[in-house]
Image: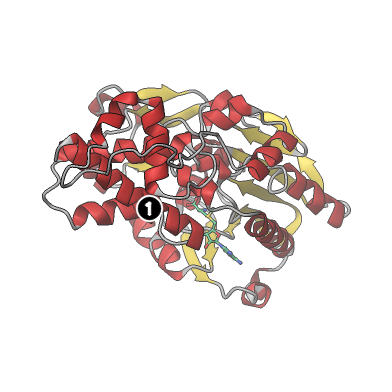
Amino acid sequence: MNPSARLQAAIDLLDKITAAARDQGASADTIVARWFAERRYAGSKDRRAIRELVYDAIRMLGERPASGRAAMLALAQRRPELAEGFDGSSYGPAPIAPDEPVAQAGLLPAWLARAFEASDLGEDEQAALLARAPLDIRVNPLKADPDAIAATLPGAMPLEWLPAGLRLASDTPVEQLPAYKDGQFEVQDAGSQLVSLAAGAEPGQRVIDLCAGGGGKTLALAAAMANQGVILACDVDRPRLSRLMPRAERAGVTIAGTRLLNPGREPEMLADQLDRADLVLVDAPCSGTGTWRRNPEARWRLTPERLARYVATQAALLDIAAGLVRPGGALVHIVCSLLDAEGAGQAEAFLARHPGWTAAPLAMGPGTPRGPGLRLTPLRDSTDGFFVAKMTRP
Ligand SMILES: C[S@@+](CC[C@H](N)C(=O)[O-])C[C@H]1O[C@@H](n2cnc3c(N)ncnc32)[C@H](O)[C@@H]1O
């Protein structure tokens, strides 16, 4: 494909990605992968170049653009060599007309920029959310030794505060490696590893992972518990939860079991677990603002109404979780979001609704105190953005 055809391909993809962001359709990654799967003629260099154009445009536009062409014109203003590709050739985009609409560069949609400012996160923090994310792995101590794994991965760097964490070049094809297939390590962002450790799960405990999804944190908890005790991993999403047990098996985790919940019927489906858990983890569904380095178009999807729905669901889940904790046990609230409404504000509201519960200190090296918990940000901590708080039942 010549440069003009690559530009047109990026425009077509951005049209699909903006429509999906507006209609809550597939993620940009999925759209790009499907698009290439249907176009076998695109070689690896074409794919890399088109992907780069698409993601560079997404990163530079705070508001969802009106069209793929308006987005690519904005990128061409920043990188004038791209303007030459608008040449009207058979596979390329039409020449640029005078006064054509061009999308406006920016970091975030205006309402979200205000929410970030209100959460004490200025433009430097917002910009860091649009950088490229590194690739982190957690070596599974039940099966492998971090130094031995590091020795097989050229360029692997140890992660501070995480004895089992390694940072790799982001294009390392880790999932092809025999050690990965054998469960000797998991792909997990450093922030996710840190908040899992901060939960403080101990060998022999009874733990409930209320929003376990595919089990990223369940496996980290099991490792911290030296595979002793019991973890009940719950979720309402059957496809996600069904991935957990095969992963646990691969990782040599024998203490986890799953329970599929029906939304709205969680309390009755967990009635046998009331007041019993030493620790309940609520890795709650959230806006995901902390993970925008990985899916920057997500900031075009979020609306004030969706954010309000996440906040309400989180509060409901924390109240359900509170009923599962034994006296003296603890509840850990985690979100991969930087907004106070979902993090510190949510934990404060929980403490206000539950007299006698108290915020517990967190044993986590990095992170900045925020309300009753700690916040990790890409800028300060070089991790995905997270909030974590631990609350103890009287
Ligand atoms: C942030 S994700 C969890 C990620 C997972 N803990 C991990 O580390 O891989 C949030 C999860 O909450 C689940 N969820 C949403 N509503 C729920 C509910 N009412 N009860 C339990 N889980 C729920 C979602 O299906 C999703 O898997």
Q: Residue at x 41, y 26 (%)?
A: 78
Q: Which residue is drawn at 74% across and 42% down?
A: 344
- Total numbered badges shown on the rendered structure: 1
Q: Quadrant of residue 120?
A: top right
Q: In which quarter of the image is ligand 1?
A: bottom right
Q: Which residue is drawn at 49% across and 29% down?
A: 162
Give the left or right position of residue 183, taking residue 312 as reference. Answer: left
* Nearer-the-camera pick, 342 or 176: 342
Q: In which quarter of the image is residue 6?
A: top left
Q: Residue at x 70, y 41 (%)?
A: 115
Q: How crowded is mark 1: few (under 14 residues within 10 Å), some or many (20 or more)?
A: some
Disc 1 is placed on an element classified as helix
Q: Where is residue 308 in the image (x, y as percent from the top left)?
A: 69, 57
Q: In this view, does 287 lie above or below 173?
A: below
Q: Position of residue 21 (x, y in %)?
A: 47, 55
- Image quarter where the N terminus lies is top left
Q: Is residue 169 above or below residue 325?
A: above
The reply to whether residue 327 is visible in this rendering is yes
Q: Where is residue 32 in the image (x, y as percent from the top left)?
A: 30, 50
List the single residue furthest toward the right. 355
Disc 1 residue type (three-letter): Asp
Model colouring: secondary structure
Q: Is residue 351 above or below residue 370?
A: below
The reply to whether residue 214 is visible in this rendering is no
* Nearer-the-camera pick, 50 or 240: 50
Q: Mark 1 points at which residue?
A: 15
Q: Position of residue 68 (x, y in %)?
A: 38, 47
List the single residue furthest toward the front. 98
